[in-house]
Image (cartoon, rainbow, N blue to C red):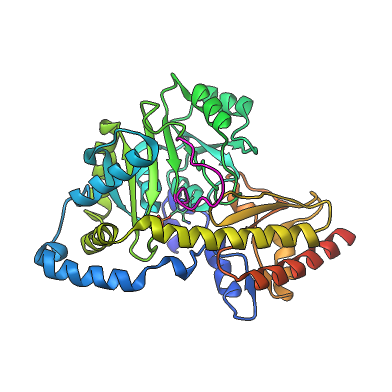
């Protein structure tokens, strides 16, 4: 019986609900707001092909050989420069670790920091694959309510007093809610964390996808001693290459994360690193980003307008300034896990809220993705979803 052979860690780790429903949602008849896929417009395929050819010609065997765990120096320097340009920070290449997707960072940080029962503070709700990555180490999850401004500060202080080793935050266009911390919200969280011995992880794969408003500085980043910022090329260039990175000035922490990475995979795919670096230096990422932001901004507006028109008045929703998702809250009588099947029968799919909470329970929330359907399809899908919701409220 394999069950007797499995580790406690894997037994404590839930499967990804999103990945399990993607099959149902991929039926061409279904309007899917369930996935988390970037729109293929964001993949610069022809330019990447040019880069691949140049990399083979110019780097030769280097692009096919084993390489350094930290990543290639050119790309680490590029990442540092980009953050310094955007935020006025003073990162150097040695502050950067290139990883196999930013997802790997969650796995590595979990291994480096968390023993069974150790506290990790997460947003309520949070990114479900972060819950998975941390769950392998069987930590104690402390959920802190996410608000329109940032975090509930009383809950945050209570969780900090209970003693946590790490706090995991998604400050921009959060997955799943689409919420962004305000400048004041960031300041309050920073002040609550100041003087505490805790690793402050800010996961920011969507930061460059802002279609409204101005970028805001990180809470920790270079402001707090154990600040870690996570980034990714998945939403800006391609998720298929699995290219992510972390930035931190805490080199003692970085050294341990690098050891965990050596153990996990020796180093990140080096051909992909050279290709992405070549792409970034031969093309304008900023021009490419304008296309993505314009598209996602229009799609988000179409979804918000359709919700305003069709959703029953008791239903509330977030209005994101960027990213790929928004969040819908229904009256508590509605369990969105049950609503999922009814919506699928009307050929519309969403992700029920439950898997985004570290503590289990029935929920009346749902995540909607707006990046993978055109505006007319979004409008029509929201109309059908509204009918399913209205029927559930009447029942
Ligand atoms: N963090 C968050 C909040 C995400 O939404 C995602 C992608 N869905 C990731 C991390 C992982 O992205 P990747 O590994 O492709 O960089």
Q: In this view, does 304 lie to the left or right of 170?
A: right
Provide residue 248's location: percent of width, then percent of height.
32, 36
Taking the view exactly as shown, the residue that stands out farthest to the top is 195
User: Which residue corresponds to the image point at 55% horizontal and 47% vertical from the top-left?
Assistant: 174
Magenta stretch: helix, strand or loop mostly: loop
Does residue 295 appear in this view? yes
Which quadrant of the rendered structure holds the C terminus?
bottom right
Q: Classify residue 99 as left or right of residue 9.
A: left
Q: Please provide percent x and percent y for residue 75.
A: 24, 51
Q: On the picture, is 277 further left or further right than 182?
A: left
Q: Where is residue 205 in the image (x, y as percent from the top left)?
A: 44, 51
Residue found at x 73% / y 75% = 345
Residue found 34% across the figure and 41% down from its top:
85
Out of 363 and 149, give the one closest to the viewer. 149
Magenta segment range?
Answer: 205-217
Q: Which of 47 and 2 is in front in this view?
A: 47
Seen in the picture, residue 226 relative to 311 is either above or below; the reply is above
């Amino acid at each position: 019986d394999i069950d007797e052979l499995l580790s406690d860690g894997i037994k404590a780790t839930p499967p990804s609900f999103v990945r399990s429903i993607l099959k149902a949602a991929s039926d061409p008849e279904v309007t899917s707001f369930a996935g988390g896929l970037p729109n293929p417009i964001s993949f610069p395929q022809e330019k990447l092909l040019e880069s691949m050819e140049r990399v083979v010609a110019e780097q030769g065997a280097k692009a096919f050989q084993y390489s350094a765990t930290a990543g290639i120096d050119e790309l680490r320097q590029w990442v540092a420069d980009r953050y310094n340009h955007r935020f006025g920070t003073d990162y150097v290449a040695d502050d950067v670790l290139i990883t196999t997707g930013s997802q790997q960072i969650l796995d590595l940080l979990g291994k480096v920091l968390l023993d069974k029962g150790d506290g990790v503070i997460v947003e309520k709700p949070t990114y479900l694959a972060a819950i998975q990555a941390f769950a392998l180490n069987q930590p104690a999850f402390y959920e802190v309510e996410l608000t329109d401004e940032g975090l509930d500060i009383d809950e945050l202080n209570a969780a900090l007093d209970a003693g946590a080793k790490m706090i995991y935050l998604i400050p921009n266009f959060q997955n799943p809610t689409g919420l962004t911390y305000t400048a004041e919200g960031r300041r309050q969280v920073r002040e609550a964390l100041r003087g505490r011995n805790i690793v402050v992880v800010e996961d920011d794969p969507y930061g460059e996808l802002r279609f409204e408003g101005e970028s805001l500085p990180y809470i920790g980043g270079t402001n707090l001693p154990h600040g870690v910022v996570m980034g990714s090329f998945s939403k800006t260039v391609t998720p298929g290459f699995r290219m992510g990175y972390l930035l931190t000035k805490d080199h003692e922490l970085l050294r341990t994360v690098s050891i965990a990475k050596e153990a996990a995979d020796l180093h990140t795919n080096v051909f992909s690193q050279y290709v992405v670096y070549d792409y970034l230096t031969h093309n304008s990422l900023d021009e490419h980003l304008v296309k993505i932001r314009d598209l996602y901004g229009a799609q988000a507006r179409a979804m918000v307008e359709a919700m305003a028109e069709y959703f029953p008045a008791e239903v509330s929703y977030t209005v994101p300034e960027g990213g790929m998702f928004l969040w819908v809250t229904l009256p508590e009588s509605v369990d969105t896990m049950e609503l999922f099947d009814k919506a699928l029968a009307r050929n519309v799919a969403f992700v029920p809220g439950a898997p985004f909470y570290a503590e289990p329970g029935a929920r009346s929330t749902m995540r909607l993705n707006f990046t993978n359907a055109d505006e007319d399809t979004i409008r029509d899908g929201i109309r059908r979803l509204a009918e399913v919701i209205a029927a559930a409220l009447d029942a």
